[in-house]
Image (cartoon, helix red, strand yellow):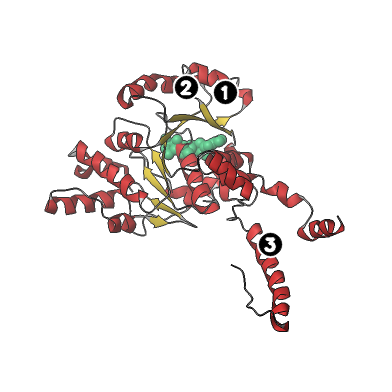
Amino acid sequence: MKGFVTTPLDAMQVQKIAQLVIDAAHLAQEERNSRSFTPISAEDALSILDRGGWQQQTIAVFSPKGGVGKTTLSVNLAAAFGVLALRTTLLIDADMSRANAHIPLGIDIEEQPANLFSLYNRVIADGQRTGRYVLHAKTLQANARRYRGKLDLLPGIPRPHMAGLPEFVDDTKRTMDIFGEIVRESRGFYELRVIDVGPDFNLPIHWAALQEADTVLLVVTPERTALSDIAGILPTLEKHLGTLQKFKLVLNQFDEQFGITPKDVVKFLGGKVTIFGSIPYAPIEARQSINTAEPLVLQKRLTRAAEEIIKLGGKFYPPLDRIGEKKEVAKGPGLFKRAQKALAD
Ligand SMILES: Nc1ncnc2c1ncn2[C@@H]1O[C@H](COP(=O)(O)OP(=O)(O)OP(=O)(O)O)[C@@H](O)[C@H]1O
Ligand SMILES: [Mg+2]
């Protein structure tokens, strides 16, 4: 509600209407120009309903290969959800080999001991008293760090050697169960959960993340060597999870000059997984965004890579589709010109 008048409409109230319209138009313009504005028209709302609405989800970003862009995709997808679309989002850094999702977000993890290790430590300490390993809401909240908008980060282990500490290795089942608790408990606070999963799925936390996820975005790069690594693990994943249905391919660092088409990629992987999104090769932008701690999707001028990531986010939360098109909207005639035309018509 931007304003109101009261009845009876006396001279003062009528004057108030005029001012109210002007103020509301200013406010609307400000909101429209703000980057967090997610336009939803009645038409959009219907199309979302047509597609069965949107589902709150746990999305794991995974690849058995290092350095393919898992963290880049996780961070930017989470920023698109939590900052652009303003949906409550938790980014979980579950990469036990090199947790670094805080870096592209510019979050200083040395500032406070809030991370995956301190969370496990707390749950295990509580559990040893009670005999049950339960994650309480306050433990989750104490370990999550607010980034911007509605995006929180649960930082990963601050030092790689911690992956070998008793909290994680003494009892595999406990390690996996606690991870399940993180996903379950965070459902109560966050509409979307994005997990940056490390490459080695023999590690219990990585495996638990794949099991808990509703969707696994399998990041691949357009090289036969990388594809052969993926092709090699698909049968194992299928055997242990029963189906590959929740696995969706994201082709990252793609350029047609590399001599392999998206169709070739699917064929190379035996047609078992389909392409869900494709992000262009953008080495300068990708590195700049990490070094300046400015996620691609939050930059003033969206690059093609950012637009593709936002589009990918739109497959989970459809109104995001419109954000990439915003520039075109701005190019059209202004509000005044349109009002003038409407009146003339
Ligand atoms: N679309 C892209 N085009 C070009 N370079 C990219 C793209 N996406 C990511 N990169 C670059 O690839 C490198 C690895 O990215 P990132 O850290 O996201 O990968 P990762 O899979 O998480 O790696 P790790 O296995 O070490 O966790 C970075 O230098 C990043 O800038
Ligand atoms: Mg990474």
* N-terminal-most mark, 1 or 3: 3
**Percent position of residue 150, x then y:** 47, 56
Q: Is residue 99 above or below residue 137?
A: above
Q: Is residue 310 visible?
A: no
* Residue 343: mark: none
Q: Residue at x 35, y 52 (%)?
A: 188
Left or right: where does residue 137 sit relative to residue 129? right
Ligand 2 visible in quadrant: top left
* Residue ID for mark 1: 262
**Percent position of residue 299, x then y:** 60, 50
**Mark 2 crowdedness (10 Å alpha carbons): few <14, some 14-19, many ≥20:** some
* Residue 227: mark: 2
Looking at the picture, tell me which residue is in the foreground, 309 or 313: 313
* Residue 29: mark: 3
Report the number of discs.
3
**Mark 3 crowdedness (10 Å alpha carbons): few <14, some 14-19, many ≥20:** few
**Which quarter of the rendered picture does the N terminus lie within?**
bottom right
Q: Amino acid at mark 3?
A: Gln
**Percent position of residue 219, x then y:** 47, 31
**Which quarter of the rendered picture does the C terminus lie within?**
bottom right
Q: What is the residue that sits farthest to the right in this orientation?
A: 344
* N-terminal-most mark, 1 or 2: 2
Please tell me whether mark 2 sits on a helix, a strand or a loop: helix
Q: CA distance from mark 1 to mark 2?
A: 12 Å
Q: Amino acid at mark 2?
A: Leu
